[in-house]
Image: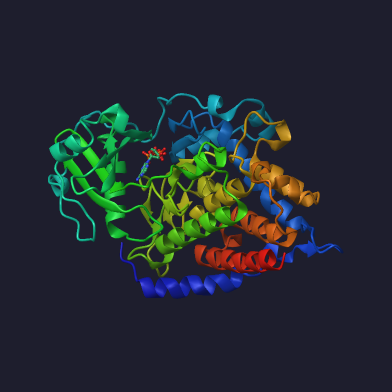
Amino acid sequence: VDVHPQAGRKLLRDGIKEEATSPVAHLQKDQNGFHFLFSSKIVAMAAPGVLILGCVFLLPCCQPKKKDAHSGDSQMDLTAMDLSSSFEGSSHLEKVSASPWRHALPSPSPSRYPPPSPNRSRHPPPSPRYAMSPRLDRFGSVHLNFSQIAKATHNFSSSFKIGEGGFGTVYKAQLPGGQWIAVKRAKKEHFDSSEFTSEVEILSKIEHLKLVRLLGYVDKGNERLIVTEYVSNGTLREHLDGVRDKILDFKQRLEIAIDIAHGLAYLHLYSEKKIIHRDVKSSNILINENLKAKVADFGFARVGPADGDQTHISTKVKGTVGYLDPEYMKTYQLTPKSDVYSYGILLLEILTGRRPVEPKRPIDERVTIRWAITSYNEGDMLRLVDPLMNERVDAEILDKIFCLAFQCAAPGRADRPDMKSVGEQLWAIRMEYQRTTRSG
Ligand SMILES: Nc1ncnc2c1ncn2[C@@H]1O[C@H](COP(=O)(O)OP(=O)(O)OP(=O)(O)O)[C@@H](O)[C@H]1O
């Protein structure tokens, strides 16, 4: 894919002007100046998205790529056949909500398309490109072989294990020079998946403070390891769950939202090639000791459409339930706006503390975006704010940030802002927040 970054930026800048007239911009203020009324358009806009979101939970042919028992996230890898058959007769959101979605997902279907190739060995010979752990041409990169990494992790000892994903187990390790690293070791059953190659290829193209840094990798024999910087303070989801020392306050949440927006804007607009993450979610956001956020886990990432005539790439649907762009699910057309949708859902999660889907809540609260839009329409915005936050935030500021989340999560990609505009809007909100806290 040939990308012309300059042309792409111009194209996207032009896009922002159109998006400035999106439905959320037409919200009306009431006499108090605190509450806004939704235009009927946003409700109409949200409804199909929620419906599609609902359809996902019922998908009879969806194959959860993995289930994370702790977070409740369920990653999806859907094919065209999976989707077309699953949309039939699965339109009642209530039905979905009535059964906890993570249990509603069946085990892998034998009718999966494309069927696995019978000739495929479970342990294919390593790609010659990655036969050696190469030296990456970047500051701080490490040049380690398998036995050095095995030594640093005390032979992948469980006491060095820091996490487990669908693709592999993650360990932390300290190098002889003192540097801490994270090592993702692929599970054997993923040796023939494209995730390793994809993650390494994408990570080696990018370098940004808000994206987890690739330091090296090993692809040799029966081992596939990805070495990245170690981010020491857990995931955003853990912080929202209150399992880390302190509950994040509003300012910290706003800064984290800005960090993520910057990381995604870089991927979409400023990296050498346009990159779509495809799995933006709170458990893929790592937090450091200064409460700065970094976007991690590029296993599903794809190089996006080249600039020029190409508006999207057509590809099977991958992502995590609850964060998946409904338009991408319907059309299999992937654009950076799919990440914007996931970001909108994530922003709502940051503000409310709630996961995108909360199966144990009352029926009308189970799909967080639907509950949030309904509550907002009823003028009950304060109800949406994470009760753990326990602080007063100016209603106008809350209003702006909730509207931004709703706009990002618009069902149609044309109604969503791009990540650059999201970052700019969050900056403006931050300035206003600083003004109100100084004057208050
Ligand atoms: N660079 C890192 N620094 C610190 N902790 C990390 C790092 N990378 C991953 N982790 C920890 O390991 C866990 C698993 O990470 P990983 O990216 O494999 O999985 P995931 O995002 O939960 O799942 P999947 O890869 O299937 O999307 C994370 O949730 C996090 O707690």
Residue 92 appearing in the image: no
| Colouring scheme applied when the structure was drawn | rainbow
Residue lying furthest right in this view? Answer: 31
Give the residue drawn at x 49%, y 30%: 70
| In the image, residue 273 above or below residue 107 | below
| Residue 342 falls left or right of residue 391 | left
Give the residue drawn at x 45%, y 75%: 10
Indicate the position of residue 218 as horizontal and vertical percent values.
19, 43
How many badges with numbers are in the image?
Answer: 0
Which image quarter holds the N terminus? bottom left
Give the residue drawn at x 45%, y 58%: 264
Give the residue drawn at x 68%, y 42%: 387
| In the image, residue 151 above or below residue 422 | above
Which image quarter holds the C terminus? bottom right
Question: As rendered, which of 358 and 10 lies closer to the eye?
Answer: 358
| Residue 105 falls left or right of residue 432 | left
Q: Quadrant of residue 168?
A: top left
Indicate the position of residue 284 as horizontal and vertical percent values.
44, 45
Question: As rendered, which of 19 and 55 lies closer to the eye?
Answer: 19
Indicate the position of residue 117 as horizontal and vertical percent values.
27, 32
Quadrant of the rendered image holding ligand 1: top left
Q: Quadrant of residue 421?
A: bottom right
Residue 36 appearing in the image: yes
Indicate the position of residue 261 as horizontal and vertical percent values.
50, 59
| In the image, residue 71 above or below residue 206 | above
